[in-house]
Image (spheres, coloured by chain):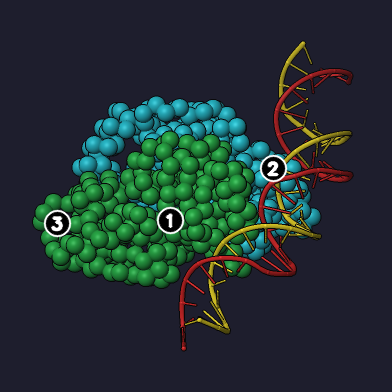
Chain colours: A cyan, B green, C yellow, D red
Amino acid sequence: MGVAMAARQDVQQADVPAICKSCEARQDGLCGAFNARQLAELAKASSRHEVPAGTELPDDGTYSNLLSGVVKLTRNLSDGRQQIVGFHFAPDFLGRPFEAKKPIRAEALTNVALCSFPRAIIDRMANEMPELGRLLLKHALNELDEARDWMAALGRKTASEKVASFLLMVARNTDPAHHPASPISFDLPLTRTDIADFLGLTIETVSRELSRLRSDGTIRIVNKRQISLASMARIEERCGD
Amino acid sequence: MGVAMAARQDVQQADVPAICKSCEARQDGLCGAFNARQLAELAKASSRHEVPAGTELPDDGTYSNLLSGVVKLTRNLSDGRQQIVGFHFAPDFLGRPFEAKKPIRAEALTNVALCSFPRAIIDRMANEMPELGRLLLKHALNELDEARDWMAALGRKTASEKVASFLLMVARNTDPAHHPASPISFDLPLTRTDIADFLGLTIETVSRELSRLRSDGTIRIVNKRQISLASMARIEERCGD
DNA sequence: GCAAAACCTTGATCTCGATCAAGGCGACTC
DNA sequence: GAGTCGCCTTGATCGAGATCAAGGTTTTGC
């Protein structure tokens, strides 16, 4: 859980109000946009939570910066079939799912640290501060791009292309700046069931495709949850796009 | 082409600057948000286009209100497999696809009327005007919701549920306020190939499922492009969610 | 109005991924 | 350390939807 663990430590080291000290430092997430006065106000209204893996994040009327960990977003059909419609990796910004017309559930896949603000404050600040609005828009458009990428994968890729694309996505989120030719290893924060629910497959197919990639030499399966890729480039070849 | 045709006439009747007279009237699209001065400025910088069915909409550095017609957004895999990742029905707002990281093509499915503004003007106005930013954000989040709905459909629905869901979507866009129990008929602005590329199926499967719905009595196929539904409720039952 | 082209439907067969089934491997509990 | 539980893997079989094939129908162009 490389990145996530690191973020977690940042948070614990910061004993100041800590409204997103960590994401501010990364100039990512929401907080880069605020001035000192606003940060002070936000710090007063914000609250930090640690949420254990497996917990559903309730709609508590807040927006949150995800300081560490991974969150999944799921839609269910009436008979229980499930589709994961997105992930949030730290340091993403969370809160939108609860405003969707059809219900979307958010659940922590790993232990998760959140910094939450009442929506009313953010909405008011967005009125004073066009940059904040633009930032929120940028985030929404990024999520839209990702959703559309996965639509193409769900609709048109084969099972093995789907699994390869998934591994590439996790690898990229783990280390965005990784050299394309060098090996990389990372923890999968998901069970086979979650992977299947994301890719529109069954767990058996996911398992078989991972085994195939292993016998190919494209990946090594260290221990069910830990994967190494020979290289980004090697797995990219198998993604179909 | 019910809705689209109506909008088309509005446009032709308006001989004034007409920067989105029609969408302004509907209090939808972008223009509801502007004041008189801004509307005047936009009218000067805007241009209206009529685009025939089948044309690809190029990235010309503008945002556009879609005054009439239907536009599809597609992503292609390297070997030519195609996935439609979204539709725009009048009076939607267009322009975002061109900012995606991976290329998304926009193509007119019907004859289309557009009202386009240079992006720089909209961006500047968004800075002065938080409501505009909020409107853009709302649009983006709506598109995101829709994309996620279709992710669930692509990943987890059967072929017949996909086709039923598609028909319901078109019916809703044709007449958003339609009574759920009364019959409705509408033109499909898409070929079977387009429907298949949207649902992640083949044209043969789409054709067969439509035939099945017809022999069910759920739909009537008037002439390949024109469909009547017995009722919204009836087709909703077959959507799986 | 006829020919060509584009699009759609239906049938026969095949295949990829689902389903059914059995067993393996850790991680906890007592 | 034996037993249970949750999760994963692998094999055998099945079936929904793809592919292959052959018309049929609608549109377009001359």
Query: According to the image, label 1 marks what residue?
Result: B187
Dot 1: what SS?
Answer: strand
Report how far apart the C-alphas of labels 2 and 3 lie in the structure. 54 Å
**In this view of the protein, which residue sits in the foreground, B240 or A47?**
B240
**In this view of the protein, which residue sits in the foreground, A152 or D8?**
A152
Measuring from the top left, give residue A164's x and y in whole percent. Answer: 65, 54
Please tell me which residue is depicted at 30% across the width and 50% down the height of the picture.
B136
**Which corner quadrant holds the N terminus of chain B?**
bottom left
Please tell me which residue is depicted at 62% across the width and 45% down the height of the picture.
B158
Report how far apart the C-alphas of labels 1 and 3 lie in the structure. 37 Å
Name the residue type under label 2.
Thr
Residue B108 relative to residue B120: left or right: right
* Label ID, residue A202: 2
Residue B160 vertical position relative to residue B8 in the rendered view, above or below: above
Name the residue type under label 3.
Gln
> Is residue B189 in sight in this rendering?
yes
Dot 3: what SS?
Answer: helix
* Rendered image quadrant of residue A179: bottom right
> Is residue A225 in sight in this rendering?
no
Dot 2: what SS?
Answer: loop
* Label ID, residue B38: 3
